[in-house]
Image (cartoon, rainbow, N blue to C red):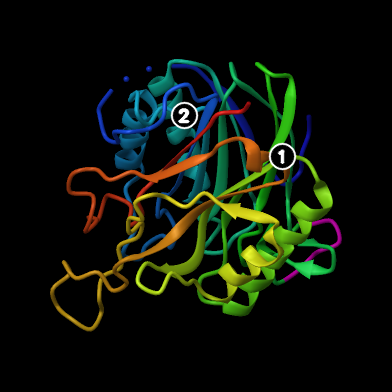
Amino acid sequence: MHLSLVKFGCVRFLLVMTVLAGVAHGEDFRILSWNVESNRPGQDPVSDPATIAAELKVLAQTAETKFGILVLSECAPESMETFRTAVAEGIGKPVDYVSSASGGFADSDSLMLLVDTTQFEIVDAMELHRFGGIKGNFNNPADASDPGALRARSPLAVKLLSKARNKSFWVIANHLARGEADLRTEQARMLRKWADTNKEPVITAGDFNFDYEFKTQKGNAGFDAMMEGGTWQWLKPDPLIDSNWSDDRRVTDKRVDRYPDSILDFVFVANEAKSWNGVSRVIVRPNDFPDTEKTSDHRPLITGFSVK
């Protein structure tokens, strides 16, 4: 299979730790989604790829967080092989991945979707720059051969084949616009239109920047656009746990979170995937917040599915 906008890889591997209790047993598969904060090279804050790789390896080999599908955002292309190797070692099986080409910050803000190839085969992949007349990025080159013109991060839609069930479905990796609220809302509308039109089982995961506040139980306009019409069902973590740390620039104490009790990271399901009994949880590890100069400012989510 040849795709001009994406890159593939394959490797093998193994590891262990306990992090998250209470993940349901008897699941068919799990997705781990995580913003690993690799963007803005040369600027603070960023994470250390070796540290992130070591954390991925532990997550991949730990019973409570072991996964068959991995969705990463803010992933620098030069770190992807490091991450792939770490995950393959963690799960002890061959893996394959696909990545996006769009995104700013000197091509260091890409999306990466990786699978355990004993469970899944990557069948197709595409970046959703625009769909149904709705934009998913600022520009839409005729052949998308100039990814540098696509300053924002277009959602990365990947079609997977479940080998156990001989059934295909889509997983969309996301990191929706942060500073451009109008584009973020358009991206959410585009994702809704795409799922409505596609009709196949769809799971979408990543950093949506929807600013959902626990106190008000409300998100921003992008969240409202995503939820409109009931196309998408949010696999809402229970309990809700803050998934992002942001230093409060107004105070010198960096132990103060600028946006406490809110969540930016989500997993949604559409079409038949709504019946797959998905359960999503925020992974909390000792001393993960506040983050350091080597760790991510986001917490991972683990989502299990029990397909009946």
Image mark for residue 305: none
Predominant secondary structure, magenta span: loop
| Residue 250 horizontal side relative to residue 110, left or right | left
| Residue marked by disc 1 | 272
Is 90 displayed left or right of 245 in the figure? Answer: right
| Residue 176, image x, y percentages | 57, 63
Q: In which quarter of the image is the N terminus?
A: top right
Write down the region rendered in magenta: 139-145
Q: Which amino acid is tagged 1? A: Glu
Q: Nearer the viewer, residue 35 or 138?
A: 35
In which quadrant will I find the C terminus? top right
Is there a contact, CB below 8 Å, between mark 1 and mark 2?
Answer: no
Q: What is the secondary structure assignment of the residue under circle 2?
A: loop
Real-space CA distance between mark 1 and mark 2, rounded to the nearest whole angstrom: 21 Å
Which residue appears farthest toward the bottom when viewing the image? 250
User: Is residue 137 visible from the viewing direction of this image?
Assistant: no
Q: Is residue 286 above or below residue 193?
A: above
SS assignment at label 1: helix
Residue 67 is labelled as: 2
Q: Residues within 10 Å of mark 2 (few under 14, many from 20)?
A: many
The amino acid pointed to by label 2 is Phe
Q: Position of residue 101 (x, y in %)?
A: 65, 51
Most distant residue in the left direction: 253
Is residue 140 rendered magenta in the image?
yes
